[in-house]
Image: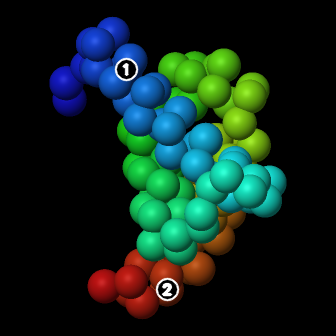
Amino acid sequence: MSHLTLTDLSALESTATTAAAYLDACDSGAKFVRLDPTYYQACGNLLLRIFSVVSAYEAFPGLVAQSNAARDVAEAIEIGHKIEVSRLGYYPQLAAILSRAAA
């Protein structure tokens, strides 16, 4: 696995900040922003992908502190990880069924 450089992290932070700003503006009902559902969904998916690769809390603490959208996505990923661990550890039969269903 390759490690991200500071330049890579800076670029990801800039991209995540832009996506989060659009989501926050739309969610707050800002009058200067036109809601484009496709772009809104793309921004959410982009944040999800970035935060799935890099811990938002460690790499972008300022963004998570300032942006509700970034915080929501970071929390959702964290909850997903906890559910995954619990499912595998405490419900192995459920994990097997879900694994078969996903295939």
Q: Element at badge 2?
A: helix
Q: Of 87 and 34, which appears nearest the observer? A: 34
- Asked whether disc 1 touches disc 2, contact meaning CB atoms under 8 Å apart, the reply is no
Q: Is residue 103 left or right of residue 19?
A: left
Query: Can residue 50 be seen here?
Result: yes
Give the residue drawn at x 42%, y 51%.
Answer: 46
- Choose top left, top right, bottom left or bottom right for residue 60: top right
Q: Amino acid at mark 2?
A: Ile
Bin the neighbour count of mark 2 within 10 Å (Cα to Cα): few under 14, some 14-19, many 20 and up: few
Q: Of 4 and 18, which appears nearest the observer? A: 18
Pick whichever of labels 1 and 2 is earlier in the sequence: 1
Residue 100, percent from left and from top: 38, 86
Q: Which residue is mark 2?
A: 97
Give the residue drawn at x 53%, y 73%.
Answer: 37
Q: Is residue 10 left or right of residue 84?
A: left
Q: CA distance from mark 1 to mark 2?
A: 38 Å
Which circle, 1 or 2, is nearer the viewer?
1
Give the residue drawn at x 59%, y 80%.
Answer: 94
Q: Is residue 56 above or below residue 80?
A: above
Residue 71, percent from left and from top: 70, 40
Q: Is residue 11 above or below residue 99?
A: above
In the displayed image of the protein, which residue is found farthest to the bottom?
101
Quadrant of the snapshot with the C terminus: bottom left
Q: Element at badge 1?
A: helix
Q: Which residue is mark 1?
A: 9
Q: Amino acid at mark 1?
A: Leu
Quadrant of the snapshot with the N terminus: top left
Give the residue drawn at x 63%, y 27%.
Answer: 63
Residue 58, percent from left and from top: 57, 20
